[in-house]
Image (spheres, helix red, strand yellow):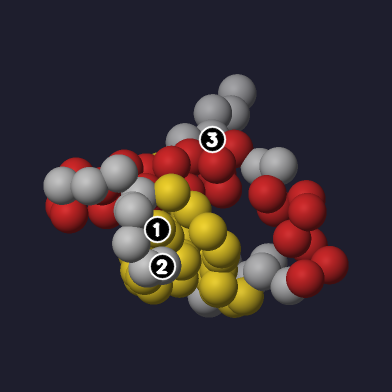
Amino acid sequence: MKTGAYRNVEPEEWEEYCKSNIWTESLAAAIAHINEAKGATYELVEVKEIRTQVVAGTNTYMKLVLKAGGAPEIHEVQTYIYTHFMTG
């Protein structure tokens, strides 16, 4: 992956990406943020789009379909997970 450039997560990478800690943490943080901001409890219906960017951590842009009792709504959110690599 080219550092610093946003790129889409391709369909053939999807299953492997969904197993990653970065994805699970990013998704959990995104839904928690939306729940807090909206004062509701949303559940994930569908992931419409994912783009990632690796810099000193991982930026993840997500377009999510969420539902909280009514009709599904599309929410766009971006998360940043800082990753610190130790060497030595």
Q: Secondary structure at mark 2?
A: loop
Q: Nearer the viewer, mark 3 or mark 1?
A: 1
Residue occupying the point 37% across, 68% down = 71
Give percent across and percent down for residue 73. Answer: 36, 70
Residue 56 is tagged as none
Mark 1: which secondary structure?
strand
Which residue is identified by label 1?
Answer: 67
Q: Secondary structure at mark 3?
A: loop
Q: Could you classify mark 3 by the number of other residues whose Cα lies within 10 Å: few (under 14), some (14-19), or many (20 or more)?
A: few
Q: Is residue 3 visible?
A: yes
Mark sitting earlier along the chain (2/3): 2
Q: Find disc 2 in the rendering and name its residue.
A: 72
**Whole-Å distance between the Cαs marked 3 and 1?**
37 Å
Local packing at callout 2 (Cα closer than 10 Å; few below 14, some 14-19, many 20+) is some
Where 23 sits versus 12, above or below? above
Q: Which residue is mark 3?
A: 85
Residue 26 image offset from top left, x and y in percent: 46, 48
Mark nearest the camera among 2 and 3 is 2
- Of residues 35 and 10, which is closer to you in this image? 35
- Image: 67 above or below 61: above
- For residue 71, side relative to residue 85 (left or right): left
In this rendering, the answer to whether 29 lies above or below 6 is above
The amino acid type, in three-letter code, at marker 3 is Phe
Image side of residue 19 versus residue 74, left or right: right
| Residue drawn at 49 percent across, 53 percent down | 44
Mark toward the start of the polypeptide (2 vs 1)? 1
Residues under numbered marks 2 and 3 in contact, where contact means CB atoms less than 8 Å apart: no
Residue 53 in sight here = no
Q: Which residue is farthest top?
A: 88
